[in-house]
Image (cartoon, rainbow, N blue to C red):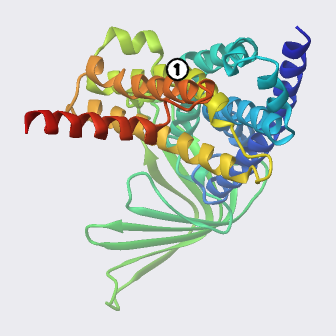
Amino acid sequence: MIFQRALRRELASAAGATFTILFSVLATWTLISILGKAAGGKVDSGDVIALIGFAILNYLPTILILTSFISVLVAVTRSYRDSEMVVWFASGMSLLRWIPPVLTFGLPLVVLTGALSMVATPWAKLKSEEFVQRFEKREDLKKVSPGQFKESTSSNRVFFVEGVTGESTVVQNVFVNTVEKDGNTVVVAKEGVIERQPDGSQFLVLKNGRRYHGVPGQADFQSMEFDRYSMRVATKVPALGADLPVDTLSTPALLVAPNRYTMAELLKRVAAPVSCLVLMLLAIPLGFVNPRAGSAANLILALLIFFTYKNLEKMAEASIRQGKMEFAAASWPLHAIAILCVILLFAWRVNPNHRYHPLVLWGAFKRSRNARKGALA
């Protein structure tokens, strides 16, 4: 009990430090990414905080998997480096005795990873997609950022405003270039605003400006001044949520409409808690290190294993999405191989004579094969 309590405290401390570092890196990267989109006019500046929260929630399962894997590996590696494992083995204790405290520490993380992957992550993606679509379906003038050229939704107008005063729908020093069948129309005005009519149509109303119309390259341009000039900018706003991607669907919705796309997404969500559990168990025998050598190699190897595992999961998802494999055939081989590797590594570390070392097993296989060839000869 003393050992288990001490180990759980050490695992919790390592997990807290690892999670803090990974979360800080993710939050910084997400902040830079979302602010860049807001500066480029791709998202609303007022939605930045919410979009950052949704993005972080989306990556939390991956952070928890890596946190649990690294924390167990760090605890085991430290025990080897400080020669505590020598005392452990000299006392007749097996490496298998590490499994119960590791599971006690890790099972809540597995459950949390599953809950995030099955429930929270789809909800965060759905809300993020709704925020983005809502901004894309706003009136053209509302999406214009001061000092930037912005193309309209219909791709035949380019807007530019110098500044914003009052509400976001009122702008100063407006430039509008419209491409039409009989030429280009350029309108400049001191002020512009969106007005909605009772029938639902929307007009861009410009005040105190000038309008130019003609064909580029020809000298017969028409020019006129106006106090008030209106142009239609939209008549109907598409329904929100009509084209949401499959990763925004809830898990029950994936089960209701089974196809290769929903099954690939379901495999991704199910694989998160399974890989979290497998990698934690794999970290116990993988944490062996020579006390006289450094422990950096173990961490590098762990990162390589983690990214290889996740890439193989993505390959399985892609095979289902492309129709090359069924869900029943692609869901279990990778995790079964990983569990087999865990069993072999435990057998190798637990056996003092290293009878299960891969080189020993390969040598025994070659000797048996040569013996059979000699018997046949």
Identify the amino acid type marked 1.
Val
- Pinpoint residue 298: horizontal percent, then vertical percent: 67, 46
Residue at image coords 67%, 35%: 63
144 sits left or right of 243 in the view: right
| Of the pair 294 and 176, the residue shown nearer to us | 294
Residue at image coords 41%, 71%: 185
- Pinpoint residue 94: horizontal percent, then vertical percent: 70, 18
Visible residue check, residue 359: yes
Visible residue check, residue 57: no
Relative height, residue 101 to residue 352 (above, below): above
Residue at image coords 52%, 20%: 274
Quarter-wise, where is residue 116 in the image?
Answer: top right
- Pinpoint residue 208: horizontal percent, then vertical percent: 64, 67
Q: Quadrant of the C terminus?
A: top left
| Of the pair 368 and 267, the residue shown nearer to us | 368
329 sits left or right of 189 in the view: left
| Of the pair 129 and 199, the residue shown nearer to us | 129
Q: Quadrant of the N terminus?
A: top right
Question: To which residue does mark 1 refer?
Answer: 274
